[in-house]
Amino acid sequence: MTPPYMSTIMPSMTPPYMSTMMPSMTPPYMSTMMPTPMSSQLQWTLGGQGLSCTVACNVKGQSCDESALQSVESEEAIMDVASKAGVKCESKNGPAVGWAYDSNPGICTDPECCGDGSCTGICAFGKTGKERTCTDAGVGHYSRLCPCVQGPESLLPPPLEYFEMASGSCSSAGGETITEKSECSAAAKELGFGITWGPNGGYPDVVNGCSVRGGNMLFLNSITDCKEGTIAGSCSCGSMNTCLCKREGGGTIGEP
């Protein structure tokens, strides 16, 4: 028999100050999300006039981030990336303009921009409707603003090295003949030539590939332009023109 002062219902064994729910094992100041790895740092750089972003970044031992090119489509955006590249958008005709070129974003860097120099320093950001690529060379008097990124070393192409040949051929020094306009201009600039003419080609008396005459004239013949016998020895490096060659790693720029 149960005394009147005793309940037939057993009381809870859990004190009122304790929860029946298990507390979270994660302290409130700790996130349950794993941090994401730090992405490679993107650096904007101004390429040489007439050079592609592929070449401009490669010279720095980096690669071009093509996706970053697509995002620059306003005056505010191009002035921002120009600043990051260490240059300023400014000209007599204003800081920036929406002129559309496949090679945008870019800056008119030639003293004769717009014919009278009034556009020298102006930045162009307009889109043509085509997707921008790293391989396009700058149009006309423009230099490209290029997004370069240092990726995993194993994924980076080896940096290009340019050198001169005063005799023989590029291949005789373990190099390759330069056949693209942007690379020819890059090689001349890297090797310290003050080019005032070219690169131009189609000459039967000039060595095939990229070459310099007189220290300031840049030639770029196709691999079939030079015709042996036109001028004796003209189709070899050094007779009339110094050849500019390229190779990947393993040498010193400027030395065969």
Image (cartoon, grey):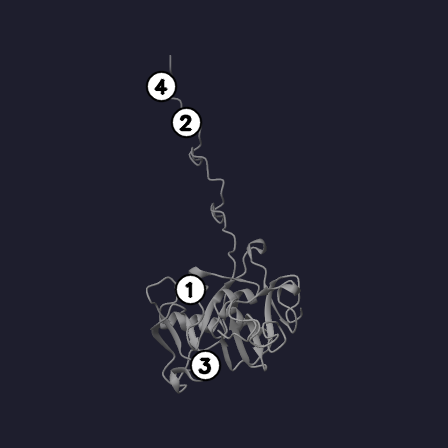
Q: Where does label 1 land, which residue? A: 69
Q: Residues within 10 Å of mark 2 (few under 14, many from 20)?
A: few
Q: CA distance from mark 1 to mark 4?
A: 86 Å
Q: CB of mark 4 within 8 Å of CB of mark 3? A: no
Q: Nearer the viewer, mark 1 or mark 4?
A: 1
Residue that sits furthest to the bottom in the current view: 116
Q: Residues within 10 Å of mark 3 (few under 14, many from 20)?
A: some
Q: Residue 108's x, y, as percent?
A: 42, 78
Q: Which mark is drawn over residue 110? A: 3
Nearer the N terminus, badge 2 or badge 1?
Answer: 2
State which quarter of the image contains the C terminus. bottom right
Q: Amino acid at mark 4?
A: Pro
Q: Amino acid at mark 3?
A: Asp
Q: Where does label 4 land, which residue? A: 4
Q: Amino acid at mark 1?
A: Leu
Q: Nearer the viewer, mark 1 or mark 3?
A: 3
Residue that sits furthest to the front in the current view: 229
Secondary structure under badge 3?
A: loop
Secondary structure under badge 4?
A: loop
Q: Residue 135's x, y, as percent?
A: 46, 64
Asked whether the viewer can see residue 146, the reply is: yes
Q: Amino acid at mark 2?
A: Ser
Q: Is residue 187 above or below residue 156?
A: below
Q: Where does label 2 land, which residue? A: 12
Q: Which mark is drawn over residue 27? A: none
- Identify the residue at horizontal 43%, vertical 71% (top origin): 80
